[in-house]
Amino acid sequence: MSKNSKEPKYITSQLNTPMLNYKVYVMSKGEKLLYSILAILIGGIIGLVFYGGLFVDSDGYPTMATYISNTVVFLAAGLFARSVYIPTRTNQLQKKRKNELTLQFRSFLEAIAVSLSSGMNMNDAIKSARNDLAIEYSDNAYMVKEVDEMLSGIQNGVPIESMMNFLGKRSEIADIVNFANVFSISNRVGGNVKDIIRRTNPIISEKISISQEIETAISSNKSQFTAMMVVPVIIVIMLKTMNSDFGAGFSTLPGVIATTIALAMFFGAYKLGQKIMDISE
């Protein structure tokens, strides 16, 4: 997560326009507040499920120490959950944004390929692609804004290959970087740009489609993984509510130690599961 703190949210283009830096995701104040409250509440409640009700008296009634310990447990568990969830959610939002940009870039290439095949030059093809993207997505779509910047660059004498490379560097998406490199080399050596786009478009589109199919294939496994993370909490709640004597065992010193060890193993399994489910580009 140090990368998020080092990388800026925007990078200035050749036209001095602040353009989105896709390499990081910086939460807005509203997002951070919402996710923080959510994480603290859920984390605090889960903490009370496992560690609540300590220091009761001999008759099983809560004491002042019980209320104090419950408050401490709620805050400690909530803040710990927040420290884990905020970076995790940030990564999820960043991956979602890059995935959207990738799909929009595929549509961009397809639109350019069609326009070039109909006899348009590159500049007109990009303008046409911009209109197609706005219809397919919206005027606020990531790739529409990128194409607007490219068109502004063309009007101000900035080479289109430079704009493509700038997008590739900001996105760190392999398909965009590779296309930008091929496009730059072909322009530099006077290659047939139309033929290059015609050849690279289906290759990149197929690669993106395969990635989407893989993501869809493991989506059910991700749902099962999430459900498995909830099951231990539900089991403990059932044990505590259905059998008070068994539930009281969680409040003893051996119970606290066993719970802590079990939670540590549970957390380790969660982090391992996340790595297994993660698909590198």
Image: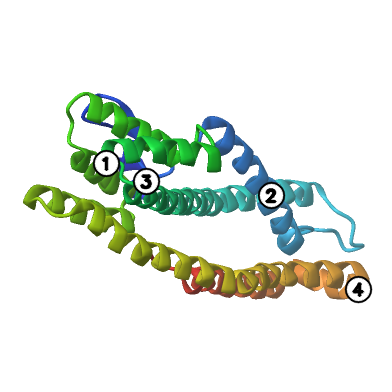
Q: Earlier in the sequence, mark 4 or mark 2?
A: 2
Q: Which residue is mark 3?
A: 115
Residue at (55, 74) in percent of width and height: 269
Of the 4 image quadrants, the one containing the C terminus is bottom left
Circle 3: is it few (<14), some (14-19), or many (20+) Cα within 10 Å?
many
| Above-or-below relation of 208 to 106 | below
Instruction: Give the SS element for disc 2.
Output: helix
Amino acid marked by disc 3: Ser
Give the distance between the C-alpha atoms of the residues marked 3 and 2, in whole angstroms: 60 Å
Residue at (35, 52) in percent of width and height: 113
Amino acid marked by disc 1: Met
Q: Estimate the x, y position of residue 120 in percent, counting from the top left.
A: 31, 41
Q: Estimate the x, y position of residue 29 in percent, counting from the top left.
A: 53, 31
Give the distance between the C-alpha atoms of the residues marked 4 and 1, in whole angstroms: 73 Å
Instruction: Give the SS element for disc 4.
Output: loop
228 and 21: which one is in front?
21
Amino acid marked by disc 2: Phe
| Above-or-below relation of 77 to 224 | above
Q: Which residue is mark 1?
A: 122
Q: Tell me if label 3 and label 4 are in contact, CB under 8 Å.
A: no
Mark closer to the observer (3, 2): 3
Amino acid marked by disc 4: Asn
Q: Which label is found at residue 148?
A: none
Residue at (83, 51) in percent of width and height: 63
| Above-or-below relation of 217 to 68 | below
6 and 12: which one is in front?
12
Whether residue 199 can be seen here: yes
